[in-house]
Image (cartoon, rainbow, N blue to C red):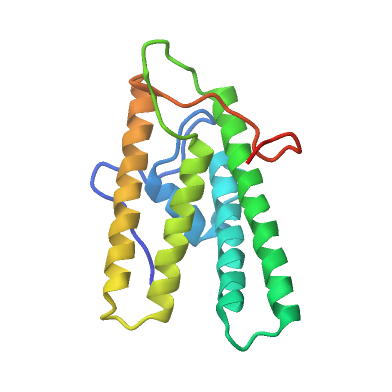
Amino acid sequence: MTHFALAAPGHDTALPDTPAALPRSSTVVRAFSHPAEVTAVHPVLVAAAKLAGEHWMRAEAHRLVRDPHADDHVLASATRTIAARDTGCAVLAEHIDIWAATVLAEPRNAMLHTETLGRLINRLCGVWTRWRLLADDAEAADPGIALALHQLTELCHAYDDLITDLQSGRRHLPVYQAITTPDAVA
């Protein structure tokens, strides 16, 4: 199993001191990698740890769907699992968004970011999952591993830049909108 360490110099890998503090990407990725170490420390980290499980189960179900020898019952079950895991990811992203809307101040003069914090962390988890699957299954010389790691690293830097901008008041997050209620439009 490949281990992941993204902590760059100057990036905080410690847990946030206050509930309003936003964890850095290295701490979020650690929550993906080591969910058993995450306790009720920070709501974003708790949701991130659960997201990793949802993404992993979703990826395993996708493997079954792509299996040319899988029978119809296996395919139907895997398809239901994918739908359930997609909903699980959306609910966890929504929990992050609710926390962010409740805790983070919205500066009036700040530029708007393009996606919510929950959606960004969900996307980060998806990229992390793809990298882990490639690293665990492929040969060491597979160029897909390096590309996936590069994409993960870039997204982590973008996440950390957003956190810095949010904390300095240069950016604000979009208005939270529930995506898991029956009235939500996809």
Q: Where is residue 3 shown, x and y percent of the image?
A: 38, 68
Q: Where is residue 127 shown, x and y percent of the image?
A: 42, 57
Q: Which of the 4 image quadrants contains residue 24?
A: top left
Q: Where is residue 43 shown, x and y percent of the image?
A: 59, 39
Q: Is residue 80 left or right of residue 168?
A: right
- For residue 12, above or below residue 166: below
- For residue 72, above or below residue 49: below
Q: Residue at x 38, y 25 (%)?
A: 167
Q: Is residue 113 left or right of residue 97?
A: left
Could one spot residue 125 in this view of the protein? yes
Q: Residue at x 63, y 38 (%)?
A: 95
Q: Which of the 4 image quadrants contains residue 83?
A: bottom right
Quadrant where the image shows the C terminus: top right
Q: Is residue 168 left or right of residue 175?
A: left
Q: Is residue 103 left or right of residue 138?
A: right
Q: Where is residue 164 shown, x and y percent of the image?
A: 33, 30
- For residue 179, above or below residue 9: above
> In front: 51, or 9?
51
Q: Residue at x 25, y 81 (%)?
A: 141
Could one spot residue 6 in this view of the protein? no
Q: Residue at x 44, y 65 (%)?
A: 130
